[in-house]
Amino acid sequence: MSRVFSIGWLMSLAFTQGRVGAVLAYPLCLLIVAVYAHCGQVYESPDRSGMVIFGRYRLWVELVAGALIFVAGTLIAFSLIPVLGPATVGVMAVVFSLLLWLGIAQMGSAAMAATPVGSETPKGDRWQAAALAQRPGTRFSALLLTKQLIDSLPTGDIAVATAADDRLLRAYEQFGFTAGKSRRVYRVAS
C-alpha cells in the first residue's frame, strides 16, 4: 500500500502518450490502484518497472468499490463546505470531475468500459488480469509477473482479460489466451 502513488504514476505513464497525458490520467490511475491495492490485488514486478492488477473476477465487488469511492468523495466534499464555502467546494468538485474524465479520455474509454467476461468465457472460477502496465523504456517485467500469477492458478480456473487494441489481442493469443468477442480473452489454467 505504501507504493500506491508510485504505481499509480507508472500506470499513468504506461497508458498514455507523453507527460501531459500521464498527468491528466494520474488522478484516475491513482484511484484505480488505491482501490485494488486495498483488496490486495496490485502486484509490482521486483524491478518496479511493471505492474498488474490480478485477482478473482467479481463484478459486484468492483461496482460496490466504485460506489463507495463516490460516496466517500461526496461526504468529503460536503464536509468541506463549512470550511471552504459552497462555491470553492463546487469549483473543486468540477475540476476533479474534469480531471477524471480527461484521465479516462487519455487512457481510452472503450478499453476501460469493456468487461472481460462474455458468453464465450468458460464457466468456473475466474481471475482477472487488468491494467498490465510497463514503464516506458523497459520491457517484459509486467508480462513475466502476469505469467507467474496465471501459472499459479489452480488447474481449471480461468484467467480473463480485455485487450485494449488488436496488437495486444495478438499478444494475448501468443501468450496462450483464446480470443472472444469485443477483444475479450481467456485462458484455462492447466
Image (cartoon, rainbow, N blue to C red):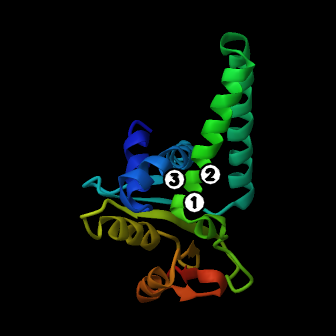
Is disc 2 placed on a helix, strand or loop?
helix
Figure disc tally: 3
- Give how far apart the Cα atoms at labels 1 and 3 are: 24 Å
Pointer 2: what residue?
A: 101
Residue at 57% x, 52% y is 102
Q: Position of residue 181 (x, y in %)?
A: 66, 86
Residue 81 seen by the camera = yes
In terms of depth relative to the viewer, which is nearer, 4 or 166? 166
In the rendered image, the quadrant that contains the N terminus is top left
Residue at 30% x, 62% y is 136
Q: Earlier in the sequence, mark 1 or mark 3?
A: 3
Q: Amino acid at mark 3?
A: Gln
- Residue 146 located left or right of residue 85: left
Pointer 3: what residue?
A: 41
71, above or below 114, in the image:
above
Is disc 1 placed on a helix, strand or loop?
helix
Q: Amino acid at mark 1?
A: Ala
Is disc 3 placed on a helix, strand or loop?
loop
2, above or below 17, in the image:
above
Residue 43 seen by the camera = no
| Mark 3 or 2, closer to the camera | 2
Assess whether mark 2 and mark 1 are in contact (beta carbons under 8 angstroms).
yes
Q: Position of residue 49 (x, y in %)?
A: 29, 57
Disc 2 packing (10 Å; few <14; some 14–19; many ≥20)? some
In terms of depth relative to the viewer, which is nearer, 81 or 60? 81
Residue at 62% x, 45% y is 98
Q: Position of residue 188 (x, y in %)?
A: 55, 82
Disc 1 packing (10 Å; few <14; some 14–19; many ≥20)? some
Q: Position of residue 89 (x, y in %)?
A: 68, 24
Assess whether mark 2 and mark 3 are in contact (beta carbons under 8 angstroms).
no
